[in-house]
Image (tube, rainbow, N blue to C red):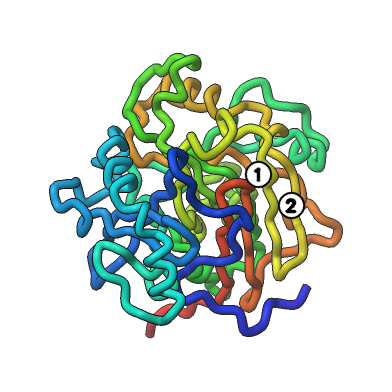
Amino acid sequence: MEPHKGREFASGLSHMDARPLVHHNCGMKLITTTQGLDPRPGLALSETVGLDLSAADPSLPTNWHALLPDLSRVRAVFDSHIDRLDEMESLAGAGENLPLPYLDLTRTRLLAPIILPSKIIAVGLNYRDHAEEQNKKLPEKPLLFSKATTCLQAPGLPIELPEELQQVDAEGELAVVIGKPGRAIARENAREHIAGYTCFNDVSDREAQYSDKQFFRGKSIDTGGPCGPWIVTPDELPDLAGGLEITCRWNGEIMQQSNTDQLIFPVDFLISYISRNMTLLPGDIISTGTPGGVGVFRDPQVFLKPGDIVEVTVEGIGTLSNPVTRWVHPS
């Protein structure tokens, strides 16, 4: 597979859904941007226009951890600014600077939508087609593991591979972000705790994963948790994000292609199951598992290398794109 040539994204955005990003009285897309050194919560109103929430309403909390439990205040800001979207898109298209609180997303760097969640919980062997490619029986209960929160990477920024890591794989996933805290959440109440959904790439050092016989080190490499480009609120998607196509491409070639209907344990079951043992907090990320087609189970095996571009697309959410580069220890 040949890497893409000459494709860069000033904002960290990549290929987007062809469908419009926003309609009246429907879902929101939650982003985190950076101006200077400070991450700031915002909204993507379209492919080119965003909204800085702190500038729009200085009384709002300045991070998503505090905003997610009650998105009604965010919705009020959204509703009060969406009517100027056409005007702002025209200004952006003409190369004009947008007045605050609007943002030109072609000039704005997006961060991972959640900064330092209390935990990232991932689910192994949760797609039927992924179990089939390993000739494994379907699990009777979820296989959970954690990823260090320092693995998170922004859309458009590189997956950095130290030279000694030669067996690094990519796993396209749907992730659910917790909005309302809870412990021992009943499955029928799980929807109340969902802030939204995003794309996730569970980058994996297979050598560490298999030699350690547990997942934490191999799943926690720095930059090995690309996430974004935004969180889509549940009202934008089918119930529990069911029936969504999910694709992972390396250098434009499809490696993984499936549907969230293939999930063995759906989102509401996972939230209930996980919360039996630990309190879920606003901003926690549950990455729900990966479909079949990962590099390690191909013949011959395929692993990431510098120059590659990895794209994770989830229908109705968008595409998360990250280049692969070589990381050199500073001397």
**Residue at coordinates 70% horizontally, 77% vertically from top-left?**
3
Residue 200 appearing in the image: yes
- Residue 136, percent from left and from top: 78, 33
- Residue 40, percent from left and from top: 27, 58
Q: Is mark 2 on a helix, strand or loop?
A: strand
User: Would you call the spot at circle 2 few (<14 residues within 10 Å), some (14-19), or many (20 or more)?
Assistant: many
Q: What element carries label 1?
A: loop
- Looking at the rendered image, the quarter that the N terminus falls into is bottom right
- Looking at the rendered image, the quarter that the C terminus falls into is bottom left
Q: Do the residues labelled 2 and 1 touch (CB within 8 Å)?
A: yes
292 lies left or right of 284: right
Q: Which residue is labeled 2 in the image?
A: 256
For residue 93, which numbered disc appears in the image?
none
Viewer-proximal residue, 96 or 2? 96
* Mark earlier in primary sequence (2, 1): 2
For residue 290, which numbered disc appears in the image?
1
From this view, report whether residue 292 is shown above or below residue 52.
above
